[in-house]
Amino acid sequence: MLPEANYEESEAGNLPLPSPLEGEDGGRIGTATRWNRRRAAIRAEFARIMYGELPPRPEAVRFELRRECDDAIDGIAIRREIRIHLEQGRKHHCIDVLWYLPKSVKEPVPAIVGMNFRGNHACSPEPDVFPPEFFPLDEPVERGSQTGRWCFRQLVESGFSVATAFRGDLFPDRADGRADSVFRLYREADGLTPEHRELTAISAWAFGYVQMLELLETDPRIDRRRIWAHGHSRLGKTALWAAANEPRFAGVVSNDSGCCGAALSRRNFGETVGRITQMFPWWFQKELDRYAGCEAELPFDQHFLLALAAPRPVLVASATEDLWADPRGEFLSARAAGEVYRLFGCEGIGDAEFPAPEQPVFGDAVGYYLRTGIHDVTPVDWKFVTDFIRRNS
Ligand code: GCU
């Protein structure tokens, strides 16, 4: 039986944090060059213990334009629906991307890549967006039911392009989802059972982020140097892991990513490693189970994950009522990551204190804010996100 989740700050523990700059030989990393080697070792540790490795690049990748509408969102956007075909030998897997571009732009635009929870048709107010075809959710999803989270109009009006794909296209989010996941390309059915924890949902989804980035890079209307990864909650954990693995992401936004995302594991507050590994084993390596209840033995904490993005900018967002994700633990992690950013001459958020709601701490390459409200993505979030991206590109 799991103990009750703790929501008392006085009980959070706040165990001392390891430093990403402490080398394996005990020596201190003092230069960006030395950090690069240390960074590779930390990334490998996250892969081994927590997230597994992203699937390899398939032998062939093909983009099929299924539909283009040059009069989308009341005429302000171009909407493209693209099927990414992944081919490995005789095996084939698809990802369907919904992609909006602002229409009236003269120069290449920045872009945001994010994965969605309930299908592309749920994200858009437009009535004819293709729903997921291959591995739909167990329950029917209403068209447009997630439009509150995907503020396409607001983003396009702010000059951003935005692309999204359904998480289920990469890894249906359930214990036996591996069998229908993108890992099918590389394994036979007996290698895709729930025991094969090394093939994780988070790495499959992160691979989907990289595929979307590569799709956007083919379009001259997109500024390839300003393609950002964005994710909410489990997909926020994913966006951080995607940016850690793919240097072409210009920056990353974690929205309410919580435990095993931005939040520190060495705090007992809200969700813990013990709980997450019991509830969502298919997201993580089996190795992580060993750290349930002994998080202090992890060779890293989640500020190391944020620091894997350095010196690229990272924005961590929390919500006041989302205590499960431990807002303060997310803040402390963002602050602690600054140690690595300083090697690159960026101040991070310095020694800022936990801010009041709607008072963003937009530091030098690291940002944090707390939004009033529940675990969600709202127009207020997107406003902070686009402001932060503008300041940091
Ligand atoms: C659950 C899970 C979290 C996750 C969240 C989500 O609450 O415990 O770790 O972030 O789902 O993805 O919405």
Image: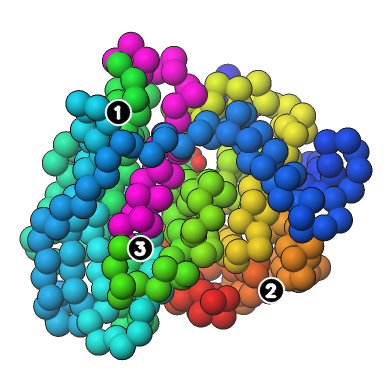
The amino acid type of the residue labelled 2 equals Asp
Dot 3 beta carbon under 8 Å from ligand 1: no
Q: CA distance from mark 1 to mark 2?
A: 41 Å
- The one nearer the camera, 61 or 388, is 61
**Which residue is disc 3 drawn over?**
217
Secondary structure, mark 2, is loop
| Label number found at residue 185 | 1
- The one nearer the camera, 358 or 154, is 154
Dot 1 beta carbon under 8 Å from ligand 1: no
**Which residue is disc 2 drawn over?**
364
Q: CA distance from mark 3 to mark 2?
A: 27 Å
**Image position, residue 76 (x, y; %):** 20, 82
The amino acid type of the residue labelled 3 equals Glu
The amino acid type of the residue labelled 1 equals Leu
The residue depicted at 77 percent of the width and 29 percent of the height is: 297
- The one nearer the camera, 125 or 182, is 182
Secondary structure, mark 3, is helix
**Image position, residue 372 (x, y; %):** 52, 68
Main SS, magenta residues: helix
The residue mark sitting in front, 1 or 2, is: 1
Magenta region, residue range: 189-217
Quarter of the image with the N terminus in it: top right
Q: Residues within 10 Å of mark 2 (few under 14, many from 20)?
A: many
Dot 2 beta carbon under 8 Å from ligand 1: no
Compared to residue 146, the image places residue 96 above or below, namely above
Left or right: 264 with respect to 93? Answer: right
Marks 3 and 1, the one that precedes in the sequence: 1
Inspect this view and state whether residue 267 appears. Answer: no
The residue depicted at 30 percent of the width and 16 percent of the height is: 188
Q: Any magenta on residue 199?
A: yes
Q: Quadrant of residue 172?
A: top left
Inspect this view and state whether residue 190 appears. Answer: yes
